[in-house]
Image (spheres, rainbow, N blue to C red):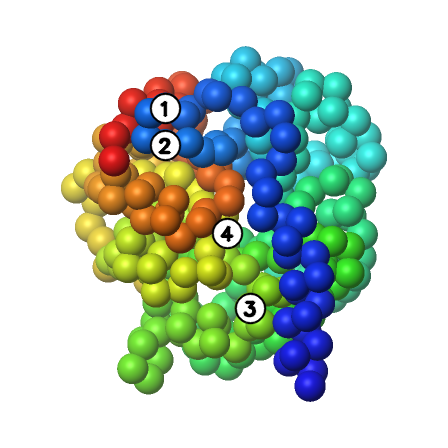
């Protein structure tokens, strides 16, 4: 009965999330790729530590309007939202640390509501050495609880897969276990393409395998020549390159993402020269054909 109740709770607000927010701009979209595309603000984390208003102005200069937040930079949610609203931004989603969800998911949900986002997620599960089954099951319980708390605020919870979840487990991986143990409707997923390619997985096959669970996508490319197959969940940030210049088969990935119904795409570029690379990645998205 509890599983059914959770599923109904997710369904009660999910329909409101299936229609893209109004006011989407045309930057980064073209004949094939229709977006909507935004920016994960972590891409400009160094700039934000120096000057928040100026960095928000830089983001606006790219023509981007949809945002995924990573922090409020020591500002209150209300003040940060005011700065976003002044510039016409649409705060679609945000990441919060796992520890905050584990400690008080209701408080996190209230903060997400104050920021006006439609999705709130987690990008890393703390773990010792290799990610293991016990840590995976504990995370699933935290995510189910967080998903229910977010649903009560009309927000969709998601987990951002980071690559270390592909440890073998039974006939599959710990990601398969995480998918199985989290409640559809309450817990959705964000695919960061680099963190699928880097551990040697196929993003197209995973999109198809878990159709309906993936709602958001990070557009991030891995430098050519970088070895794949690592389950560390980490690589040198300089291995983040302009979309279309790395190892990813973007026409295949974007076509599959469209087919399975990805709702929002965000460029995330962690490289030291992200500010230069972001406009080039937007141009690639405008020109890519599939």
In the rendered image, the quadrant that contains the N terminus is bottom right
- Whichever of callouts 4 and 2 sits on the residue coming sooner in the sequence is 2
Residue pictured at 64% horizontal, 80% vertical = 3
Q: Quick one: 288 or 140, which is closer to the camera?
A: 288
Query: Marks 4/2: CA distance?
Result: 16 Å
Numbered circle sitting on residue 74:
none
Q: Answer with left or right where residue 251 lies relative to residue 267.
A: left
Query: Marks 2/3: CA distance?
Result: 27 Å
Which element type, helix, strand or loop, lies under badge 3? loop
Q: Quick one: 64 or 275, which is closer to the camera?
A: 64
Residue pictured at 79% horizontal, 38% vertical = 77
Q: Say which residue label 3 marks.
A: 184
Label 4 packing within 10 angstroms: few (<14), some (14-19), many (20+): many
- Whichever of callouts 4 and 1 sits on the residue coming sooner in the sequence is 1
Q: Say which residue label 2 marks.
A: 33
Residue 148 position, x and y percent, is 71, 66
Query: Marks 1/3: CA distance?
Result: 32 Å
| Residue 147 position by quadrant | bottom right
Label 2 packing within 10 angstroms: few (<14), some (14-19), many (20+): many
Which element type, helix, strand or loop, lies under badge 1? loop
Numbered circle sitting on residue 215:
4
Residue 239 position, x and y percent, is 31, 38
- Whichever of callouts 4 and 3 sits on the residue coming sooner in the sequence is 3
Label 3 packing within 10 angstroms: few (<14), some (14-19), many (20+): some
Label 1 packing within 10 angstroms: few (<14), some (14-19), many (20+): some
Q: Say which residue label 1 marks.
A: 30
Above-or-below relation of 267 to 188: above
Q: Answer with left or right where residue 70 lies relative to residue 278.
A: right
Question: Which is in the foreground here, disc 4 or disc 1?
Answer: 1
| Residue 186 position by quadrant | bottom right
């Amino acid at each position: 009965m509890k599983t059914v109740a959770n599923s109904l709770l997710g369904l009660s607000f999910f329909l409101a999330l299936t229609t893209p927010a109004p006011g989407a701009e045309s930057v980064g979209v073209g004949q094939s790729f229709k977006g909507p595309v935004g920016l994960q603000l972590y891409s400009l984390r160094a700039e934000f530590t120096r000057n928040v208003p100026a960095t928000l102005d830089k983001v606006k200069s790219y023509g981007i309007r949809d945002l995924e937040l990573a922090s409020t930079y020591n500002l209150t949610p209300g003040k940060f939202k005011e700065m976003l609203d002044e510039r016409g931004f649409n705060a679609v989603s945000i990441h919060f640390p796992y520890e905050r969800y584990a400690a008080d998911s209701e408080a996190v949900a209230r903060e997400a509501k104050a920021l006006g986002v439609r999705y709130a997620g987690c990008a890393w599960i703390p773990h010792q050495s290799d990610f293991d089954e016990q840590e995976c099951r504990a995370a699933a319980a935290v995510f189910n609880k967080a998903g229910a708390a977010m649903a009560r605020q009309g927000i969709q919870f998601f987990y951002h897969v980071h690559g270390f979840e592909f440890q073998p487990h039974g006939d599959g991986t710990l990601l398969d276990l995480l998918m199985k143990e989290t409640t559809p409707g309450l817990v959705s997923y964000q695919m960061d393409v680099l963190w699928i390619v880097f551990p040697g997985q196929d993003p197209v096959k995973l999109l198809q395998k878990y159709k309906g669970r993936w709602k958001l996508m990070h557009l991030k490319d891995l430098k050519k020549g970088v070895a794949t197959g690592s389950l560390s969940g980490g690589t040198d940030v300089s291995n983040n390159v302009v979309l279309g210049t790395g190892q990813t088969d973007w026409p295949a990935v974007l076509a599959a993402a469209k087919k399975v119904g990805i709702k929002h795409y965000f460029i995330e570029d962690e490289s030291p020269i992200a500010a230069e690379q972001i406009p080039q990645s937007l141009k690639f998205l405008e020109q890519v054909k599939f």
